């Protein structure tokens, strides 16, 4: 995933998004009433991957030998 982010993603591209339907509460089922809170989840996800601003930082790239 880190290699893809570095080689494919354009600087102006925002690709870590979900379809709009995930912004609305789930109608029923086990997730009924729940909404995806991507804006809260992404910072933690990036931190766990060792990324900076949604992309692998220089330290992560060095760790991967890139």
Image (spheres, rainbow, N blue to C red):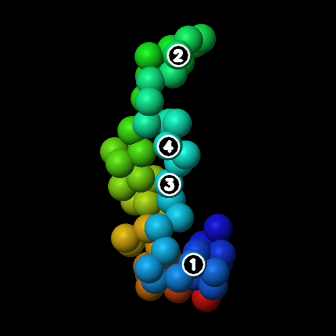
Q: CA distance from mark 4 to mark 2?
A: 14 Å
Question: In the displayed structure, does residue 26 sit left or right of residue 64?
Answer: left
- The mark closer to the camera, 4 or 3, is 4
Spot occupied by residue 19 in the image (x, y as percentages of width and height): 55, 46
- Horizontal and vertical percent position of residue 1: 64, 67
Q: Residue at x 43, y 36 (%)?
A: 23
- Looking at the image, residue 48 lies above or below residue 27: below
Q: Is residue 50 visible?
A: no
Say if residue 52 shows up in the picture: yes
**In this image, 63 relative to 41: left or right?**
right
**Is 43 or 33 nearer to us in this picture?**
33
Q: Nearer the viewer, residue 45 or 20?
A: 20
Quarter where residue 7 is shown:
bottom right
| Mark nearer the viewer, 1 or 2 | 2
Q: Earlier in the sequence, mark 1 or mark 3?
A: 1
Q: Mark 3 and mark 4 in contact (Cβ < 8 Å)?
A: no
Which mark is on residue 20?
Answer: 4
Quadrant that contains the C terminus? bottom right
Name the spot of residue 39 as percent of width and height, x first: 35, 48
C-alpha distance separating marks 4 and 1:
21 Å
Residue that carries the numbered disc 1 in the rendered image: 9
Where is mark 3, residue-wise? Answer: 17
Residue at horizontal 53 percent and vertical 64 percent from the top: 15
Q: CA distance from mark 1 to mark 3?
A: 14 Å
The answer to whether 49 is drawn above or below residue 44 in the figure is below
Q: Quadrant of residue 58?
A: bottom left
Q: Residues within 10 Å of mark 3 (few under 14, many from 20)?
A: few
Residue tagged 2? 27
Label 1 – label 2 distance at C-alpha: 34 Å
Foreground: disc 2 or disc 3: 2
């Amino acid at each position: 995933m880190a290699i893809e982010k570095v080689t494919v993603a354009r600087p102006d591209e925002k690709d870590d998004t979900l379809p709009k339907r995930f912004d609305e509460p789930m109608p029923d089922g086990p997730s009924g009433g729940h909404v995806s809170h991507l804006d809260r989840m992404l910072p933690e996800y990036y931190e766990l991957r060792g990324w900076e601003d949604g992309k692998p930082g220089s330290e992560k790239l060095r760790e991967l030998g890139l």
